[in-house]
Image (cartoon, rainbow, N blue to C red):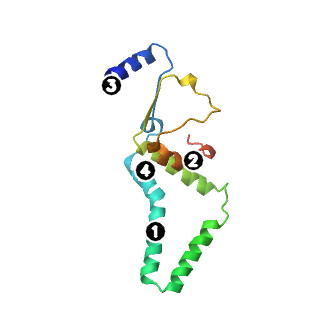
Amino acid sequence: MAEQMEERHAAAEAGTAYRKFSGKDEFPSNMFNRILAIALWLGSLHFNFFLLLFSFLFLPFSKFLMVVGFLLVFMVLPLDPHSKFGRRLSRYICKHLCSYFPITLHVEHIHAFKSDRVYGLFPSFLLIYVMLSPVPCISLA
């Protein structure tokens, strides 16, 4: 395996179209920003879960239904897609999570990819792909 990688790197130096993409190289970040981005991304899901659990266990049933109703109303409220705060927050989360996940993509023929085609991903990349789905509307630069 290591020999194949050395051959590929040698071929890349010889002028072929080999390219290596890494989240840490493309979007460098420190550990504090990575942890904060994960907390913002996953913390909201956990907050909703614990809010429902707390209201179910410790509030009367009518108050629990009110909490569920508020969460449903907030879920379907129209959001401003051009919100500066929302764009800055999603740009921050996507930028720092790209450097957190240890993904390295080795491309042997970069010019063989067409920008107007969709290419498949392995199931292990599905979570990151879904997480970064709003990225086309956000410039990470």
Q: CA distance from mark 3 to mark 2?
A: 32 Å
List the residue tagged with mark 1. Answer: 49
Q: CA distance from mark 4 to mark 3?
A: 34 Å
Q: CA distance from mark 2 to mark 4?
A: 20 Å
Q: Nearer the viewer, residue 27 or 134?
A: 134
Q: Earlier in the sequence, mark 2 or mark 4?
A: 4
The type of residue carrying mark 4 is: Asn
Residue 44 in the image: state x and y as whole percent: 48, 63
Q: CA distance from mark 3 to mark 1?
A: 44 Å
Q: Nearer the viewer, residue 51 or 23?
A: 51
Q: CA distance from mark 1 to mark 2?
A: 23 Å
Q: CA distance from mark 1 to mark 4?
A: 24 Å
List the residue tagged with mark 3. Answer: 1
Local crowd at mark 4 within 10 Å, few (<14), some, or many (≥20)? Answer: some
> Mark 4 and mark 1 in contact (Cβ < 8 Å)?
no
Residue at 46% from the left image edge and 79% from the top image edge: 55
- For label 4, the SS is helix
- For label 2, the SS is loop
Quadrant the C terminus occupies: top right
Q: Earlier in the sequence, mark 3 or mark 2?
A: 3
Indicate whether 34 appears above or below 24.
Answer: below
Q: Earlier in the sequence, mark 4 or mark 3?
A: 3
The type of residue carrying mark 3 is: Met
Indicate whether 77 appears above or below 16.
Answer: below
Q: Earlier in the sequence, mark 3 or mark 1?
A: 3
* Residue 139 visible to an observer of this rendering: yes
Residue at 53% from the left image edge and 85% from the top image edge: 62
List the residue tagged with mark 4. Answer: 33
Indicate whether 109 appears above or below 74.
Answer: above
The type of residue carrying mark 2 is: Ser
